[in-house]
Image: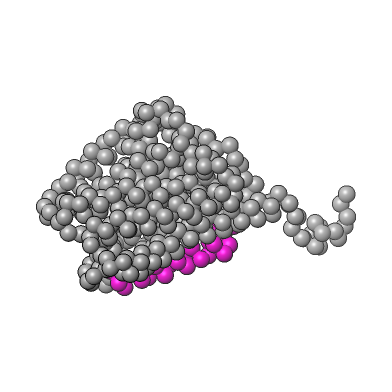
Amino acid sequence: MYVSGGPYSNKYPYPPFYPEVYEERRRIRSTSNSVCLTALAGIFLLFLLPIISLIFLRSMGFVTRTNKFDGLPPVLYYIVSSFNYLIAMTVPALLYFSAEHIPISEGVPFHKVKTSDLWLFVAVGCFVCLLANFPAGWVAKIQQYFGFSGSLPSLPLNNDPAVLALYVVNIAVVPPLVEELMYRGVILQSLRRFGDGFAVLVSAILFGLYHGNFIQMVFAFFCGLVMGYVVVRTDSLLPSILIHFINNGISVMTDLVTRYRGAHAAENMSNVIMVVVSLIGIAAIAILTSEHKLFGKKGKHRSVLPLSSRLGAAFGNFGGVIFMVYAFLSSIYCLYHY
């Protein structure tokens, strides 16, 4: 019954209280805080484990001199680096699933995908990742305009075949496995109950911020969008792992061709890859669209909050704020040290 002068009258225009809105905002904050802290734990271990490894190996007599491989034999350097990366990303993710009582099959879905559909989605993902190089390149040019190098940190190399093989593993094999576990597994799957589009967007933003420099931040954001979208459409991490693997593999190939054949050869190779990936990607988009598999309603979860409110809740918590602070400080550091 309406009462004149009551809390919903013009005289006292108090906003109505909707329990479901409050509860969803609280759940988004809580879930986002948990997944951000999990990802931050992985980042912290990425800094801590190399220090512990060096102290241990020095005590065992493996660190004998100062070189670009942190004083380690080059092969051992890459073995330790890959192992540390696996541990740093995998352990926090598995602990999160255990603490939240999330079955691995739910947190890391690998539902069966028709082989032809799998490779069509992979082709679309690779095409979008290729296009993501353009905004990343613009960011590099902006940095150069303001007097910064516009370059990225790189790993040391020599001409030892074993070192080169381990370099490929360290860049093209390990990250696609463990980063997909964290960002399309832990983060994306945990947030899907608040809307698939929202989950894809937040996981992509965090994936971009994770890289810790402005150039890769932009590139990884767009890659994260398409990889998250593909995971949602297929209910499987396999296509995103393959997209990630191919993308990083192309980057490694470009680095190695530049090293051994020169920048001109690398540019020619990049142009060929761009044409081939673009043609295949456009064809894949056409095929999936014609079969109504690329677009259309997919998610079962609906939210009572608008996207802006959900994003505010996703980043307006302790974990979200710390994650953004880390990304900003790391990006500033990279500007002045590379």
**Where is residue 249 drawn, in percent x and y?**
27, 47
Q: Residue at x 35, y 66 (%)?
A: 56
Residue 269 in view:
yes
**Where is residue 117 drawn, in percent x and y?**
38, 30
Q: Nearer the viewer, residue 254 or 315?
A: 254
- Name the image quarter holding residue 17: bottom right
Q: In screen coordinates, is 228 left or right of 145?
A: right
Q: Which residues are magenta?
A: 312-338
Q: Residue at x 39, y 38 (%)?
A: 239
Q: In screen coordinates, is 201 left or right of 63?
A: right
Predominant secondary structure, magenta span: helix
Q: Indicate whether 46 appears above or below 229.
A: below
**Where is residue 127 drawn, in percent x and y?**
32, 42
Q: In screen coordinates, is 113 left or right of 137?
A: right
Residue 204 in view:
no
Q: Nearer the viewer, residue 176 or 233?
A: 176
Image quarter (top left, top right, bottom left or bottom right) of the C terminus: bottom left
**Where is residue 256 drawn, in percent x and y?**
18, 52
Q: Residue at x 37, y 70 (%)?
A: 332
- Name the image quarter holding residue 192: top right
Q: Residue at x 30, y 43 (%)?
A: 246
Q: Residue furthest front?
A: 60
- The verdict on residue 331 being magenta is yes
The number of discs equals 0
